[in-house]
Amino acid sequence: MELSITTPALLFPAISLLMLAYTNRFLALASLIRNLHDKYKKDPDQKHIIQQIRNLRTRIRLIRSMQALGVISFLFCVVCMYCIFRNWTDASYIIFALSIGAFMTSLVLSLLEISLSTKALELELSDLEKETRVNFFTNILGVRDSRDPD
């Protein structure tokens, strides 16, 4: 396989877009953590908020690792281009492989973070689903629930 100076440069737009997406995730989670922290300060008896903050802390750490691996991948691409420029063929192949490896690891961590966020949403919506199941047939049959205020 021929490795030209433009080959590592092909990863630049992909890495840049991923870094932007990771930063947006990080900022959204940071805002959510601040809001939950304020809610907890007002009412410390809400234990579910602590669980949510723990989940968010784990996700923040994952995003930090994803960002670090993205930056490392970007740096390896630049170093690979330098090695190609200097005609250090073996080094350029190894460094390009490291760049791809860091990029892939970042994507795997992203998948893990998405999985955690989905689980958190499922827990959040589980209470709503229980209510919906209880009232499903009464809504279809038009029977009013005695708990309804109307």
Image (cartoon, grey):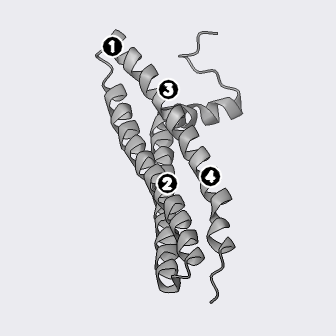
Q: Which residue is mark 1?
A: 41
For residue 59, which quarter of the picture?
Answer: top left
- Residue neighbourhood size for the residue with mark 1, other residues' Cα within 10 Å, grouped as few (<14), some (14–19), many (≥20): few
Is disc 3 placed on a helix, strand or loop? helix
Figure quadrant of the N terminus: bottom right
Q: Report whether residue 78 is seen.
A: yes
Is disc 2 placed on a helix, strand or loop? helix
Residue 54: percent from the left, percent from the top? Answer: 33, 36
- Residue neighbourhood size for the residue with mark 3, other residues' Cα within 10 Å, grouped as few (<14), some (14–19), many (≥20): few
Q: Which residue is mark 2?
A: 71
Is disc 4 placed on a helix, strand or loop? helix
Q: Which residue is mark 4?
A: 16
Lower sequence index among marks 2 and 3: 3
Mark 2 belongs to which amino acid?
Val
Lower sequence index among marks 2 and 4: 4
Left or right of 85? Residue 40 is left
- Give the answer, above or below, for where 134 lies relative to 91: above
C-alpha distance separating marks 4 and 1: 37 Å
Query: Viewer-nearest of labels 4 and 1?
Result: 4
Q: Which residue is mark 3?
A: 31
Residue drawn at point x = 64 percent, y = 87 percent: 2
